[in-house]
Image (tube, grey):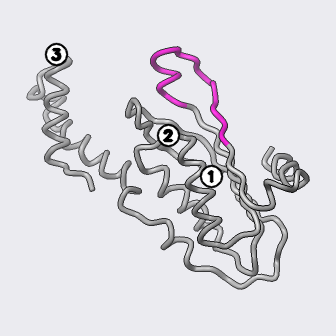
Amino acid sequence: MVDKEKVEYAIRLLLEGIGENPERPGLVDTPNRVARMYEELLSGCEEDTQKHLMKTFPAQNSEIVIEKDIQFYSLCEHHLLPFFGKVHIAYIPNDKVVGISKLARTVEVYARRLQIQEQMTTQIADALEKNLSTKGVMVMVEAEHMCMTMRGVKKTGSKTITVATRGCFLTDPTLKEMFMNLIK
């Protein structure tokens, strides 16, 4: 839970630390705006993905289900800068499916935490595998990291890709290949 009072105090100190006057007209409301922003951007810390994945529907389908191009925005825990991109999810149901919006909600919960991409990819795959008892899961995350594009090495347009595979996606190369072809 974001302690808005502490965030406001910290932002005032930050503004002073970089040589700004937190009382000047353009900055006087900035500490409050930043506190509200962090409350929104980090709202996933309060949520459990299980609540989104609990509502399932019986299904005889045991073929691949793919939801691709799920946009997300997150904050890197190393620099507190954004990273953003798309998540692609595939799973093989085991007598039940989840509403497709719940896949996007699951992504949102994990993205709205101080996070690293590698961990977020794994968390999404683990949550789906555990809560849906799938036969297999594959998650791919493609993201641009502002800590690489606007500072440091400054390599605009570079993308980081992470993949997590579970169950039959680990053992069946044709499933992996199908997933990769379908998300292109």
| Element at label 1 | strand
Residue closest to the eye, 174 or 65: 174
Element under disc 2: loop
Q: Which residue is mark 3?
A: 19
> Is residue 115 located in the magenta-colored stretch of the structure?
no
Whole-percent x, y for residue 41 in the image: 38, 48
User: Within the magenta stretch, is there residue 158?
Assistant: yes
Q: Amino acid at mark 3?
A: Gly
Q: In the picture, which quadrant includes the N terminus?
A: bottom left
Crowding at label 3, few (<14), some or many (≥20) Cα neighbours within 10 Å? Answer: few
Which circle marks residue 40 in the picture?
none
Image quadrant containing the C terminus? top right
Q: Which quadrant of the structure image shows residue 28?
A: top left
Vertical relation: 38 (above or below) 144: below
**Which residues are drawn in magenta?**
145-162
For residue 99, above or below residue 57 = above
Q: Are marks 1 and 3 in contact (CB under 8 Å)?
A: no
Residue plotted at (65% across, 68% down) = 100
Left or right, 96 with respect to 184, comes to left
Report whether 32 appears left or right of 44. left
Helix, strand or loop at mark 3: loop
State the residue position of label 2. 116
Disc 1 designates what residue? 70
**Which three-letter amino acid code belongs to the residue tagged 2?**
Ile
x, y percent for residue 37 = 31, 45
